[in-house]
Image (cartoon, helix red, strand yellow):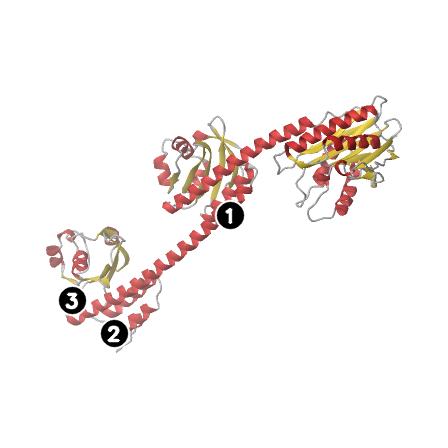
Amino acid sequence: MTSNAGEAGGVRPGADPLAWMARALSATVRPGDVLDVVADAVGSLVGECSLNISLLDDGGRTLSTVMSRRTSPQVRMQFAAFPADAPYPTRDALRSRRPVVVQGLADRDRRYPALAAVPVSQVAWVVLPLVVDDRPLGTLSLGWTTPQPFDAAQLQLCEGIADVTAAALARAQMFDREEQARTAAEDLATRLQVLQDLTGQLSEATDLAAVGDLVVGAGLQALAADAAAIGLLDDDGRSVTTLASAGLPADLLPRWSRHDVGVSGQVADLRESLRPVMIASRADRDARFADRDPRPEDDLFEATATLPLVTAGALVGVVAYAWRHPRTFDAHDQGYLTAIAAHAATAIDRSRLLERTRQIAETLQRALLPEAVSDVEGWDLATCYVPAVQDTQVGGDWYDAFATDDGRLVLVLGDVAGKGVRAAAVMGAVRSALRAYATLDADPATVLRRLDTYFGAFKDDEMVTVAVALLDPRTGEVTYACAGHLPPLLVSGTSVEWLDAATSPPLGANRGGDRPQTTTRVAPGQALLLYSDGLVERRHESLGRSLGTLADRAGTLSSAPDLTAAARALIRTMDAPDKVVDDTALLVVRRHPG
C-alpha cells in the first residue's frame, strides 16, 4: 500500500494511525464534525485517494452522499442519492458486511455493468460497510488513481477506518437525536404554555380587536411565524374584515380594512372546504393557485398556513400565519394550528354575543333615562351617561332635569345599588315617584322625606342614593339635599366649593330620620356639577383623594364653549387603570356670565 509519511493530517511517523484517528473522533459531537475528521485523516492513513461517505435514510432504502472528496462534480451529482439495492458495490458491502474490492475498470464494468458508463479517474476501489452492532449506517468508499495491492494489512487498515468512523457516526447521530428530542420537547412545552395562556386570555377578552391581537401573537410566539393576520367574514360572505395583523407592511392589512375573499386562493379554498390550507413553499403555492393573480404579500413569504374559524358549522373568519422560508407542516403543527383556530372561533363568537348584549343593555339603559330639559334662558345644561365598559347589564344610575309650574328647575342625580334588570326597575320606579312628589312640592327635603315613606311601603330592601337640587334660573338660588349621595360641586374657574352641608343617609337606610337641606347661589359664570360615584371611585385610592382630583379637573366646566363636550372630556380625564367598573352619570348646569 502507498503511505504518506510525515505529519500530514496529524499523523507522526511511528504513531498508531487508527489510535490517533479514534482519539480525534472521540472529541467530535455532531455528524458533520465526524465527517470532517475522517476526510482530513484518510489521506494520511491510506495515501491520496477519493473519499465518498453515503448514509442510509430511516427506512434503509436510500443512500445519500454526505461527504465527497476528490470526486468529479458529475459523479457527485449522479450519486447524491440512490437506492440502497442498486447493483453497485455499496449494495454488496451492506449485504455481506464485508469490504468490496474492485481491481481496475475492467473488473468494475464486468461485475457492475450499471457503472460502465460512469467516467472516473480512479482505477482501484474498496467499498466498506459502516456497521455498528449489526446495524448498517451506510458505506465508505475509497478510490485510487493507481493500482493497489489490497493486501491484508491495507484491507485491515481500511476496515479499521470504517469501524472507528461508524462508531463515531453512531454516537454523533444519537447525540443529534437526543438534542432533537430535547428541542422538540422544549418546543412542545412552549407551545402548550402559549396555548394555555391564550385560552385563559381569550376567556377574558370582551371585544373583537383584543381577540385578534391575542390570536396573532400566539402564532408568532409558538410557531416562530414571521407574519400573521386574522379577519372576520362579512355577512355577505364575499369579503373579510381585518381584526389584527403583524409582520406585514402597515398599509397592507390595517385593522378594520375590508378585502375581497376571491383575491386569496387560500381563503377561497377554505371557504368551500372548511379545512386548513397549508402551503409549504412559493413553488407549492404557484402550482396550486396558478389560475389566480399574485398578491403583494406573495413575494414576501414562502410558506403559509390559513385556517378557518368555524362556529356552529359556519365559517365566521380566517386566521393565517406566514414564514419567509419554506417549511413543512407535520401532524403536530396542523393539530396545534387547528387548536388555536378553534379557541379563536369560540372567543369571536362570545365577543359578538357580548357586544350584542352590551348594545341591547345600553339601548335599554338610555331608554330608561328621561329626556332632560335643555332650553333654559340664561343657562347651559349638559347630561352625560357612560355605561360600564366591561358590563353587559343595565344599571341603576340616572339623571333628571325638569321644570316646575313656577319656572324653577329640579335637578336630580341618583344611583341604585346593584346591577341588572332589578336595579333598572328600581331606578325607574324611584325616578317616577320623585317626579310625582316634586309636582306636589319641589322642596328637596320634602321630596326626600316622601321618598322615605315610599321606600318604607314598597322598597325597604333596596338602597338608593340621590342628590336633589331646586334651581331658580332667574336668581341663581339653588336649594339642595343629598340622601347618601356624593356632594355636588360648584365650579368657578380654578375655584371650587363642595356642597356638603345637607347630607343624610341613603333612601333605604334613613328609617324616618330628618332630611336637611340648605341654600346657596350659582353666580354668573359658575357651573353646578352633580355626578354618580362611577366618576370617582378607584380600587387603590381613597375617596377623598379622588374627589380632590375631580376638583382639580372640573374647572373647565365654567368656561368651555361647549358644555356637553367639556362634560365628556371630564369623564375621560377621570379615567384610570384602577377605576371601579361602574356606570357614570353626570349632570351640569352653568349660568351665563354677565
Task: Identify the image quadrant of residue 492.
Answer: top right
Compared with 81, 30 (above or below) is: below
Compared with 374, 110 (above or below) is: below
Between 198 and 295, the one lying in front of the other is 198
Q: Residues within 10 Å of mark 1 (few under 14, many from 20)?
A: some
Camera-nearest label, 2 or 1: 1
Between 118 and 564, the one lying in front of the other is 564
Quarter in which the C terminus is drawn = top right
Helix, strand or loop under label 1: helix
Can residue 591 be seen here? The reply is no
**Could you tell me the amino acid type at mark 3?**
Gln
* Between discs 2 and 1, the one toward the N terminus: 2
Q: Residue, x 81% and y 23% (percent of image)?
A: 439
Helix, strand or loop under label 2: loop
Where residue 330 sits: x, y (%)?
Answer: 36, 46
C-alpha span from label 1 to label 3: 67 Å
Marks 2 and 3 close (CB-CB < 8 Å) = no
C-alpha span from label 2 to label 3: 17 Å
Task: Identify the image quadrant of residue 489.
Answer: top right
Where residue 397 sits: x, y (%)?
Answer: 71, 34
Between 518 and 551, the one lying in front of the other is 518
* Between discs 1 and 3, the one toward the N terminus: 3
C-alpha span from label 2 to label 1: 65 Å
**What residue is pinned by disc 3?**
148
**Could you tell me the amino acid type at mark 1?**
Asp
Where residue 507 sits: x, y (%)?
Answer: 76, 35
Q: How crowded is mark 3: few (under 14 residues within 10 Å), some or many (20 or more)?
A: some
**What residue is pinned by disc 1?**
197
